[in-house]
């Protein structure tokens, strides 16, 4: 009978095809969005949903807990929204926004709002965090979300967002 670690390793190997399928779906959606011509006016209308958290100027919060999306590269915004939409990236504040097909039901919506946010100015210092959530390894930055309760003496953190820029 295999050991517990052996069963875990076997289960992980069996799940690899599912991971590659998810990557394929995400990359396919990203390519489809990038091939679209963004509509700036429609993006401005959709941005109202984003502004509820990221602020009307897309600057995020002063402590960096809600990131600045204003002026972010278009391709990065597209990738992030698609990854949220497909469950490759998770944040409970984004539940029902990027993951909901009600707010942005079409890929065109992603193109429009990402374009609008990328064109916003970046003249404020909001949305720049203190760097405690970023760990540098091998020249690449990996993001690990550390919930507030983990700072109360426990070393537990949420690994779901590790490597968010991937």
Image (cartoon, rainbow, N blue to C red):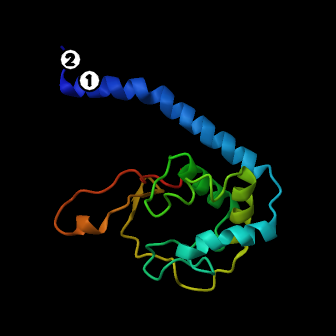
Question: Which quarter of the figure is the N terminus placed in?
Answer: top left
Residue that carries the numbered disc 1 in the rendered image: 7
Residue 107: mark: none
**Badge 1 vs badge 2, beta-carbon distance below 8 Å:** yes
Q: CA distance from mark 1 to mark 2?
A: 6 Å
Q: Position of residue 46 (x, y in %)?
A: 69, 67
Q: Position of residue 150 (x, y in %)?
A: 24, 64
Q: Nearer the viewer, residue 147 or 105?
A: 105
75 versus 11 height, above or below: below
Residue that carries the numbered disc 2 in the rendered image: 2
Residue 143 shows in the view: yes
155 versus 1 height, above or below: below
Q: Position of residue 14 (x, y in %)?
A: 40, 23
71 versus 142 height, above or below: below
Outermost residue on the top side: it is 1
Q: Position of residue 28 (x, y in %)?
A: 68, 40
Q: Is residue 20 left or right of residue 158?
A: right
Q: Nearer the viewer, residue 36 or 164?
A: 36
Q: Quadrant of residue 142?
A: bottom left
Name the residue: 72% across, 45% down.
31
Element carrying mark 2: loop
């Amino acid at each position: 009978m295999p050991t517990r670690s052996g069963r875990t390793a076997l289960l992980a190997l069996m799940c690899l095809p599912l991971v590659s399928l998810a990557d394929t779906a995400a990359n396919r959606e990203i390519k489809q969005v990038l091939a679209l011509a963004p509509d700036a006016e429609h993006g401005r209308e959709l941005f109202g949903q984003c502004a509820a958290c990221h602020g009307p100027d897309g600057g995020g919060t002063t402590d960096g807990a809600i990131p600045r999306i204003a002026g972010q590269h278009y391709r990065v915004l597209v990738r992030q929204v698609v990854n949220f939409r497909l469950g490759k990236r998770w944040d409970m504040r984004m539940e029902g926004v990027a993951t909901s097909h009600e707010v942005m039901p079409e890929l065109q919506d992603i193109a429009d709002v990402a374009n609008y946010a990328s064109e916003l100015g970046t003249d404020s210092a909001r949305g720049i965090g203190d760097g405690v959530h970023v760990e540098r390894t091998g020249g690449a930055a990996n993001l690990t979300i550390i919930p507030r309760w983990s700072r109360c003496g426990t070393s537990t953190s949420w690994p779901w967002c590790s490597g968010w820029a991937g």
